[in-house]
Image (tube, rainbow, N blue to C red):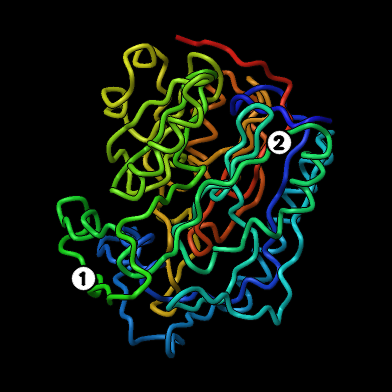
């Protein structure tokens, strides 16, 4: 089928499910620490205090326990199997080799990670694939693991666009957000080290993840938290101005929007809290807001100081809609399931244990490419 995805709720026909194969470590360096700053350096129960010198983190490589990797692979394959059994065509990325060499840029080096959280570096709008500019060095080549699939859709008539790629020197990153301790919940944060100068510096560069965008037909809400996002937003606005209305939302979160707000169908949002309503354009403030109860700490595995926790406990709001009535939800979230069922959604539970260690939920791990959808004006 031809590429066609205008929203997050129309009946799903084809999807890409990420791969967790050979995901064994996190590469701790400036771009990683900036991106995950809120999650690494909080001190409440949601984010165990990180001690850089503890655990198996010799150098910049933070190893992940083998058992967690095995269970992650089991859960990702279970997700793909569930979708296939529901009659959805499932595509998979190229598997990252276990001996993949480091990615080398101008003045930096990082070990690549598999194409797992594939929602991040790609934005599908109708019949167009837009590769977005990555913010984490280890993910710089991640969409190359999706190239065979993108080429297939291109050969079938899809448009294929790549936003300008950042150089990613230290000075490329706007650090104002991570240095503003008022944007954190767990007390003062540990500082991000000062960036080092480079002959390749060009100032703040555009960086934006597809997961910062909420597709609402002709309207696209984009979360902007720093100058990198703002520059990318302007590029996207110019590129799409004759087809879509883009709305810049300032700092709904540090980057991704899909653990804060998701559209389950026209007129219905799943939201972290009711206050998000006031951040939205007027036409969308009238929608119903489903706000689930706060997550329970015992719904997550217990981790120790050697485990790098990368997401908030609200990660399970990151659900995947299969249609206006059917929603894939983490089976560990009894409160969320109950609220959605009370709102007359058909909940399909799946297992996803270590979402906090690998930075993504069900929406993050997937990229819908074909939905039975048309471009609607929902205002």
Residue drawn at 26 percent across, 23 percent down: 278
| Residue that extends furthest to the front in the rendered view of this protein | 199
Which of 15/185 is in front?
Answer: 15
Query: Which mark identifies residue 65?
Result: none
On screen, residue 151 versus residue 238, left or right, reads: right
Going 43% across and 80% down the picture, which residue do you hit?
A: 306
Give the percent coordinates (x, y) of residue 71: 66, 66
In front here: 303 or 212?
212
Point out the image quarter for the C terminus.
top left
For residue 175, what is the image quadrant?
A: bottom left
Q: Spatial distance from mark 2 to mark 1, Cα to Cα?
A: 39 Å
Q: Nearer the viewer, residue 99 or 239?
A: 239
Sort mark 1 into few (<14), some (14-19) or many (20+) by Cα contacts within 10 Å: few
Q: Label 2 belongs to which residue?
A: 369
Query: Which residue is tagged 1?
Result: 191
In this view of the protein, can residue 41 be seen by the observer? Answer: yes
Q: Earlier in the sequence, mark 2 or mark 1?
A: 1
**Quadrant of the frame with the N terminus:** top right
In this picture, residue 292 sits left or right of residue 178: right
Q: Secondary structure at mark 1?
A: loop
Q: Residue at x 21, y 56 (%)?
A: 176
207 shown above or below 277: below
Identify the residue shown where x is 38% and y is 60%.
Answer: 35
Give the residue furthest to the bottom. Answer: 58
Residue 343 seen from this side: no
Residue 311 location in percent, x, y? 42, 56
Secondary structure at numbered mark 2: strand
Residue 350 horizontal/vertical position (percent): 67, 45
Whole-percent x, y for residue 338 in the image: 52, 31
Local packing at callout 2 (Cα closer than 10 Å; few below 14, some 14-19, many 20+) is many
């Amino acid at each position: 089928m031809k590429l066609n995805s205008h929203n997050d709720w129309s009946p799903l026909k084809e999807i890409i499910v990420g791969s967790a194969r050979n995901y064994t470590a996190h590469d701790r360096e400036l771009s990683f620490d900036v991106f995950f700053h809120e999650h690494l350096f909080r001190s409440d129960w949601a984010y165990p205090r990180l001690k850089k010198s503890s655990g198996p983190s010799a150098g910049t490589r933070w190893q992940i326990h083998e058992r967690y990797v095995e269970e992650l692979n089991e859960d990702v394959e279970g997700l793909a199997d569930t979708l296939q059994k529901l009659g959805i065509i499932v595509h998979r990325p190229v598997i990252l080799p276990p001996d993949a060499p480091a990615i080398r840029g101008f003045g930096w080096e990082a070990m690549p990670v598999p194409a797992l959280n594939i929602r991040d570096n790609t934005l599908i709008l109708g019949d167009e694939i837009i590769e977005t500019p990555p913010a984490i060095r280890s993910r710089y080549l991640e969409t190359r693991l999706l190239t065979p699939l993108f080429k297939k859709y291109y050969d079938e008539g899809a448009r294929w666009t790549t936003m300008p790629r950042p150089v990613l020197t230290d000075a490329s990153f706007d650090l104002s957000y991570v240095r503003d301790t008022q944007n954190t919940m767990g007390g003062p944060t540990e500082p991000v080290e000062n960036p080092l100068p480079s002959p390749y510096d060009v100032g703040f560069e555009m960086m934006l993840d597809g997961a910062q965008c909420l597709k609402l037909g002709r309207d696209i809400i984009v979360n902007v938290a720093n100058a990198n996002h703002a520059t990318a937003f302007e590029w996207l606005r110019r590129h799409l101005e004759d087809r879509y209305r883009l709305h810049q939302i300032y700092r709904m979160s540090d980057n991704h929007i899909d653990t804060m707000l998701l559209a389950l169908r026209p007129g219905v949002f799943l939201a972290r809290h009711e206050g998000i309503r006031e951040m939205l354009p007027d036409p969308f403030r009238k929608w119903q807001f489903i706000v689930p109860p706060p997550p329970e700490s015992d719904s997550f595995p217990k981790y120790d100081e050697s485990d790098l926790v990368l997401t908030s406990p609200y990660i399970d709001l990151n659900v995947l809609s299969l249609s206006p009535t059917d929603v894939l939800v983490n089976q560990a979230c009894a409160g969320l399931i109950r609220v959605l069922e009370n709102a007359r959604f058909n909940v399909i539970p799946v297992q996803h244990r270590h979402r906090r260690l690998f930075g993504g939920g069900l929406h993050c791990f997937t990229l819908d490419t074909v939905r039975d959808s048309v471009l609607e004006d929902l205002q």
